[in-house]
Amino acid sequence: MTRPPTAVQRRIIDAAEPVTGRLTGTESQLAALVKRGLAFRHPRPPHDHFLTPAGHRVREAGPPETVAAPPPPAASGGFAARVGGEESAGDGPARAREVHSAWQGLLELRRMTNPVGATDRPCGWERAHLVRAAALALEAAGHRPAGPEAERGGYRVRTTPQPEAVAVHEPDPGALRGCAETLRQAGWQPSEHTDPRTRERYLLASPRKV
């Protein structure tokens, strides 16, 4: 059985940047994480360290034994893309900067982890977090997420029975087509469908592989 991270390693992993997984610590601490396969050292200057997929899984699983579960990232002040339907955490320049920074971080993660540094298609992190990744692409492009009251419009990104696809709902047909174009430019494959019961038009979108 793999030995769990030490308390210090756990704190470093938990403090990693939400999207890119960039780590902060001493050289010896980071080297220890690399040795355990939980981090890797980027070959290009400034040679920052980042979580590997195994490191991301450790962070998302949380500590093996806790008295109370830690608050989710959004509640603890971390960045969370708006999937639609939640209460607004505030708009304006501050939110715009957060979204822009998160999107740029995601593009950097693509460059570091995709073959030949490709940034035009989703990376492994996005395939493991489909709803959050699609929502970030939409919010970064300026689309408006739906509020708690769906009738007011805005996008909503939701899971689907298909393992590699999300559904994007947007009551305005023009805005729905805009969402499709944004996702296409972000490296997703969107297609428009009609719900047979409600006759609502919606998108199915999956990350492009090639």
Image: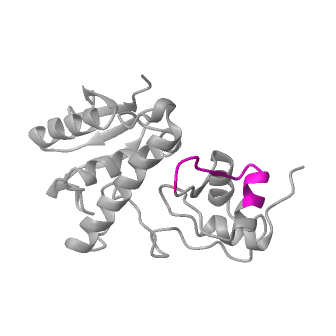
State the residue at coordinates (27%, 69%): 95
Residue 115 lies left or right of residue 52; in this view the side is left
Quarter-wise, where is residue 25 in the image? Answer: bottom right
Is 190 situated above or below 37?
above
State the residue at coordinates (86%, 51%): 2
Residue 99 horizontal/vertical position (percent):
31, 61
The reply to whether the magenta stretch includes residue 33 is: yes
Q: How is the image coloured?
A: one colour
Q: Is residue 162 visible?
A: no
State the residue at coordinates (59%, 70%): 15
Residue 203 horizontal/vertical position (percent):
27, 33
State the residue at coordinates (25%, 35%): 185
From the viewer's side, name the closer residue of 18 and 73. Answer: 18
Q: How many marks?
A: 0
In the picture as drawn, the residue positioned furthest to the top comes out as: 210
Residue 38 lies left or right of residue 165; in this view the side is right
Tell me where the magenta segment starts and ends, as one range: 31-45
Is 161 situated above or below 87?
above
From the viewer's side, name the closer residue of 8 and 179. Answer: 8
In the picture as drawn, the residue positioned furthest to the right comes out as: 1
In the picture as drawn, the residue positioned furthest to the left comes out as: 174
Residue 113 horizontal/vertical position (percent):
53, 40
Residue 179 lies left or right of residue 103; in this view the side is left
Quarter-wise, where is residue 139 in the image? Answer: bottom left
Q: Is residue 172 visible?
A: yes
Q: Quadrant of the C terminus?
A: top left
The reply to whether the magenta stretch includes residue 71 is: no
Residue 75 horizontal/vertical position (percent):
47, 74
